[in-house]
Image (cartoon, rainbow, N blue to C red):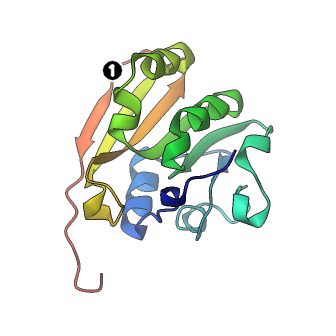
Amino acid sequence: MSEKTGDVVYTPEWVARDMIGYFQPEGVVLDPCRGKGVFHDLLPSDSPWCEITDGRDFFEWTEPVDWVISNPPYSLTRPWFRHSYTIAEHLVYLVPLRNVFSGYGFLKEINDFGGIAGIRVYGTGGSLGFPMGNAVGAMHVHRGYSGPMDYSLHRHVREEAE
């Protein structure tokens, strides 16, 4: 599958650090779209990764993993989740929340896989340097999950170094 031009947006380091700290992935954790490595660099050094520009297409990945965590191409949100269901127990993706919640079919697919264990909202795309103004959050989807959904709103305090 090919990405659209606006799909390449790099996650701020503070968001990747917070996502990993908040959701605490363990076991085999795949970064399915490594980009510049902001997530992968925070994972154990032997963690697997994919990056289409480096010849490793996520849609060709078939090995089971415990977690996938990343910021996927937004034009491929639904196909990305669908492929993730075939390889992972836990998905944590930074996405425009409207990409998930605007369609009943997508929510039904998530429910059929398991459920949303948590959402951590980081702000608007514009506040993260992304080319959109919609709310962006990290969604944790867990195979077979049927418990309550955790929700949090992250309030980032900019540091002088940023």
- Horizontal arrangement in the rendering, residue 11 relative to residue 87 (left or right): left
Relative to the observer, which residue lies in front, 27 or 153?
A: 153
Q: Which residue is mark 1?
A: 148
In percent of the image, x 54 and y 37: which residue is there? 91
Residue 23 picture location, percent across and down: 44, 45
Q: Quadrant of residue 118?
A: top left
State whether residue 2 is above or below residue 156. Answer: above
Residue 53 picture location, percent across and down: 71, 64
State whether residue 53 is above or below residue 95. Answer: below
- Horizontal arrangement in the rendering, residue 12 relative to residue 75 (left or right): left
Quadrant location, the C terminus: bottom left
Farthest residue to the front: give it.
5
In percent of the image, x 43 and y 62: which residue is there? 17
Relative to the observer, which residue lies in front, 4 or 127?
A: 4
Residue 6 picture location, percent across and down: 48, 58
In percent of the image, x 25 and y 41: which residue is there? 152
Q: Secondary structure at mark 1?
A: loop
- Horizontal arrangement in the rendering, residue 88 relative to residue 135 (left or right): right
How many numbered tags mark residues here?
1
Quadrant location, the N terminus: top right
- Horizontal arrangement in the rendering, residue 40 relative to residue 105 (left or right): right
Relative to the observer, which residue lies in front, 106 or 39?
A: 106
How packed mark 1 is, by other alpha carbons closer than 10 Å (few <14, some 14-19, many 20 or more), is few
- Three-letter code for the amino acid on which mark 1 is drawn: Pro
Residue 36 picture location, percent across and down: 58, 71
